Amino acid sequence: MQIKCSDSIKKTNIYVISINEGEKEVKSQLGNDYQKIIKDYVIKKEGFLGKYGEFYLLNNLEGEVDKILVVGLGKNLDNQKARELGAKLYQHIKNIPNNKDVVIEKINNENITISFLSGFLNASYKFDKYKTVKEEEKIKNVTILDSRLKKEVEKCKIINESLNFTKNLINEQAYEITPSKIADIANIIAKENDLEIKIYDKKELEKMNFGAFLAVARGSEQEPKLIHLAYKPKNPVKKVALIGKGITFDSGGLDIKPASSMLDMKDDMSGCACVLGVIQAVKKLNSNIEVHIISALCENMPSGKSYKPGDILTAKNGKTIEVDNTDAEGRLTLADALTYADKLGFDEIIDIATLTGACVVALGNRISGIMGTNKKMLNEIIKKGEEVGEDLWEMPIKDYMRDSLASNIADMRNTGGREAGTSVAGWFLSNFVKNKNWVHIDIAGTAHISKPYGEHSKGATGIMVRTLTNYLT
Ligand code: BES
Ligand code: MN
Ligand code: ZN
């Protein structure tokens, strides 16, 4: 699908005109004749009200356009409703025959038009790599009819490409997406985007004392990797590290998961996939913020070599951890990745992880958990999320949570009871960052979904690609 911006149109199959609820006539660049048809026929005779999500198709027209699709915007269309309506429009047009060229007139204002377009593009995503019979994308060209939106449309496209990249990586099977494979992909990204890259293998990680991370990796046949990519603009206004959880498959390890819980665990690298998407967008949008992404990649598998409950690990920062449950592996890999980032002295550190089932219970599938040490930064990220339709809700981290993870023989355990699981995991992570500007985002419930909603289809959502890109550009 080609997306462009223009002031004039060539022969068009579907021309999209929108109407706010209750409007009795439309202004359209198509001119008076068409405006009259919509006013006298669609609105007056056919009773089109302009309700949110109402569609009316005018067929078999003569001239430049074959069909006009009138879309109801409802009352008080905001950005979120616009995104969801853009997705509805895609679904609707998909079922109209002869839909190769779609032209969309500006909707209300620039901002709303871009939100609408981003929902439209998001809805057009499919992961059909393994379908032997593929559904062909018939829509070939989408034109936003207002060349003043060119820059914003370009930005929307870039962010959508990152979203697609992230979703593809998450939806791919774990057999394909191993730590080494992600390292290869990271190399390609670095080359294509002119980013600095360093990939550490097991030997190097051993020398650098990644004790907690390597313990998790031990049970797998796959070699662990740590990837570090950097986008470095001249004179950056600040330096931010993004750390993504990168468990390419989480079986639970020796504390093996029941079948139903293991089903989606190829998605346990969603944090990594997200930050890999974000850095590409940040670079293409020429941000003036220096952005580093770091991900400790491994599988969590049961085997004769696996780390065991009762083992005592020495993390990279020297703290000792008694393994209470091998399924709480994400916080162990993140602990060392956080320490690694902490030592490099960033202005801000953000980690993003499919960390706790407790977060799914607490917040469901449409709200991500967020917590950390800097309220201002945290609230800013929540606001940036809200702007792009990704909800975040703050979870508390309290000092007394150390009691939940108290160990008799080590500095702490990796799990405690079931209570406040998301917050306790946050408290655990806080032990590995001295940086006061640290924020942790738990996307266990939101990174992938089993029921579609709004603009999202089943499977990976690419959640936080938009939020973090918005925060970093
Ligand atoms: N990757 C899981 C968390 C998860 C659960 C992600 C559901 C997506 C959907 C994580 O590694 C995990 O297993 N967490 C355990 C921690 C427990 C042992 C304290 C959990 O939440 O059950
Ligand atoms: Mn786990
Ligand atoms: Zn996990």
Image: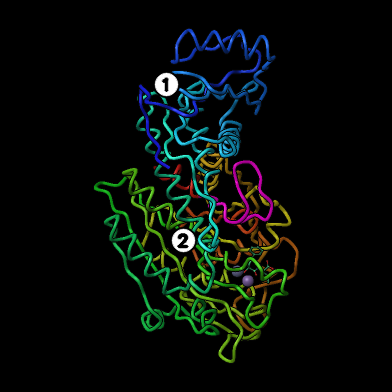
Kindly identify the amino acid type of the residue bearing the numbered disc 1.
Glu
What numbered label is drawn on residue 243?
2
Residue 72, compared with residue 212, is above or below; it is: above
The residue positioned 53% from the left and 76% from the top of the image is: 299
Q: Secondary structure at mark 2?
A: strand
What numbered label is drawn on residue 64?
1
Q: Is residue 197 within the magenta segment?
A: no
Q: Is residue 453 within the magenta segment?
A: yes
Residue 419, compared with residue 205, is above or below; it is: above
Q: Give the extent of the magenta segment.
A: 448-464
- Measured as percent of width and height from the top left, residue 342 is found at 42, 63
The front one of 155 and 85 is 85
Kindly identify the amino acid type of the residue bearing the numbered disc 2.
Ile
CA gap, disc 2 and disc 1: 51 Å
Q: Main secondary structure of the magenta part?
A: loop
Q: Is mark 2 within 8 Å of ligand 3?
A: no
Figure quarter occupied by ligand 2: bottom right
Residue 22, compared with residue 259, is above or below; it is: above
First-in-chain label (2 vs 1) = 1
Q: How many marks?
A: 2
The front one of 437 and 330 is 330
The residue positioned 36% from the left and 22% from the top of the image is: 7
Instruction: Please state if 128 lies on the left or on the right of 285 as rendered.
Output: right
